[in-house]
Image: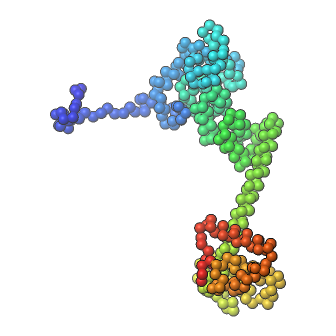
Amino acid sequence: MENVRLGSPQVANGSVPVPPSLPTPSTSYNQRGFMMNGSLLKGYSCVSTATKDLWENLFDSGYKADVIINTDFDGVIYAHANILSIASPTMKGILKQSKRCGRWRTLSIHGVPLNAVKVFIRFLYSSCFEKVDMEDHVLHLLVLAHAFVVPQLKRECERQLEQGLLTIENVVDIFQLALLCDAPRLGFICHRMILRNFMAVSATEGWKIMKQSHPVLEKELLMSMIDEENRRKKRVRKLEDRKIYLQLYEAMEALVHICRDGCRTIGPHDKDFNKNQAPCNYPACKGLELLVRHFAGCKLRVPGKCIHCKRMWQLLELHSRLCANSSACRVPLCSNFKNRIKKQSKKDEIRWKILVQKIYRTKAIGGASFLFKVTP
């Protein structure tokens, strides 16, 4: 095809050649879902099939291999010292110190199944792994990646465990491995899972084995469980306290509303309650109705003689401590309680101040302003 330049007759006539289409994944990329450079590509691998097969064939054939890797049960894997040294600094140091027997150097990996070692060495060649191999040997691969300093594989093992391979049955074993392999994030996730499912986890075989082999770790987990339970109770207690302070705020708000506006729902104390009356916008009005009616007609209104009247006295005193302008306030006895504050004991004064501060703090979290602080 002739070269086409701008301004040429071909361009002027609109006959610009169409560029070739991009290569499709089915022809140029592998669709098996491999891991490359530390990231798992679920749909396609960024390594072409030809490139991956080249490294796979080099590993499988052992062409000009110069390293013998001895495993358990007399298993042998052939590899190349240059590739192992580049992929793992630990292996590089071991191979430098190993004695050469002809062209061969030896490297021993024991305590791990042969197939797990093959998956590990294959990853050093192509940075790829099969999903089924990861599911079968993820724990062994995590140990090998940590022991031989292969951070890409280690991160991928942690990610696979976090995203589905971590279960109630194996969480104790993985938690111990996370501590040994310096995987703090994985250890934190395991620790949180153990605390959230403590009864189920403590009944697993892994917990029983840990109890015998690592009693100190079991004690630490039990202490963590106790601390977590105490924190949970403290959170519940704080929520209950906030609920009470919020109810007190609403009661103070309704009290100002009743005394300033006159609530149509409650009405005068000497008239019956109108059931057909529209509900009041202040939620605490309905709760204060019986208390206000009782306080207005009770003959034992002296504090301490009647428990209901005592509660009403406390509400009135609390209002006076929250009221910004008692001289113009329409709530009964507001200014009297203001004067009475000066005569109270220091202990009572501190107790009331703490209560007022907690009410202010509770409503500040909600972002609401206090109605009873506004001058009527």
Report whether residue 284 is seen: no
Q: Left or right? Give the position of 30 relative to 304.
A: left
Q: Quadrant of residue 125?
A: top right
Task: Decide which of 242, 160 is in the foreground and name it.
Answer: 242
Residue 259 horizontal/vertical position (percent) = 64, 85
Residue 29 horizontal/vertical position (percent) = 45, 30
Up the image or down, 256 lies above or below 171; here it is below
Screen quadrant of the N terminus: top left
Name the residue: 60% across, 85% down. Answer: 261
Q: Left or right? Give the position of 18 relative to 274.
A: left
Task: Decide which of 290, 95 is in the foreground and name it.
Answer: 95
Name the residue: 64% across, 81% down. Answer: 325
Up the image or down, 330 lies above or below 86; here it is below
Q: Total of numbered circles in the picture?
A: 0
Q: Quadrant of residue 35?
A: top right
Name the residue: 68% across, 21% down. Answer: 109
Screen quadrant of the C terminus: bottom right
